[in-house]
Each structure stands twice: as C-alpha cells, then as structure tokens.
Image (spheres, helix red, strand yellow):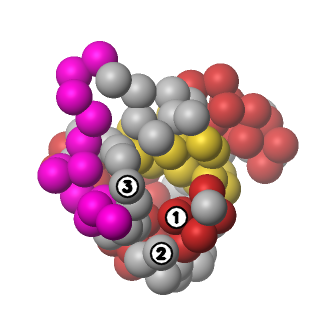
Amino acid sequence: MGRGDDSGAAAAGDPPLASIVVPLLDGARDLERSLTAMRAQELDGALEILVVDGGSRDGSRAIVARAAAADPRVRLLDNPARRTPHALNAGLRAARGEYVVRMDAHTRFPPGYAAAGIA
C-alpha cells in the first residue's frame, strides 16, 4: 500500500480514492495529532481530508489552515449550522473520492484505518 503523503496524490484532474470527512468544533487540543494521523493513512490511491468547521473559537481553524498550506489534500469547509449532521452533509457534497471515510478530530487513527474500512 502506498503511504498517504504527497506520493499518493492523484494526477491532476483524477479524483482521490478516498475522502476523509471530519466534523469539527473547538478541537484544537487534539487536532494536530489527529490531522497528522489522517495525513499518514496508508492507502493504495490518493486521499483528501475535508475538515468541516462549525465556527471553532479555540484556534482550530488556524491549525487546519496551516495543515492545508502544507498539504493540498487538506481543505477547510464551513458548517454555519454548527451541528454534526450538517457538517457531514457539507463534507459529502464536497467529497470527490470514490469512498468516504468519517474520522473525528479528537481521535488518533492507525495508519491502516482508511484502507481497512475500504477493504
């Protein structure tokens, strides 16, 4: 399996294999660690990470913005409704992957988590 880093990026115009959708509201305490684990997913194919923020006020948005600046697979979306179902729907609308993987901003994921779910 390929590593979920830039070497696994899809060619220009090709959709990613998996879209990771992450509802977020004030998750700064765990977010960097969680994003690092998401970005390190071992997957045969590219992935994108869609962080859908419900108006965080704890610095979470800045953390995601830094991750997005360093890794084009990371995108920050808005969830003005501030509710998880709305965040998931926004993520699903924006997802370009063949598969959608739900991950949470407060959780550490093993490197094979996305691949196991897809399998």
Q: Identify the image quadrant of residue 89.
A: top right
> From where the camera sits, is residue 72 visible?
yes
The structure residue drawn at horizontal position 60% and vertical position 42%, both measured from the top left corner, is: 99
Which residue is label 2 attached to? 112
Q: Quadrant of residue 48?
A: top left
Q: Answer yes or no: do the residues labelled 1 and 2 have beta carbons within 8 Å?
A: yes
Residue drawn at (40%, 60%), measured in percent from left and top?
43
Residue 93, given in percent of the width and then of the height, sits at 65, 24
Mark found first going from the N terminus, 1 or 3:
3
Q: Residues within 10 Å of mark 1 (few under 14, many from 20)?
A: some
C-alpha gap between disc 1 and disc 2? 5 Å
Amino acid type at image mark 2: Gly
Quadrant containing the N terminus in the rendered view: bottom left
Q: Which kind of residue does numbered mark 1 sit on?
A: Ala
Determine whether, in the image, residue 65 is placed left or right of residue 25: left
What stretch of residues is rendered in magenta?
1-13
Residue annotated with mark 1:
115
Q: Secondary structure at mark 2?
A: loop
Say if mark 1 contacts mark 3, CB within 8 Å: yes
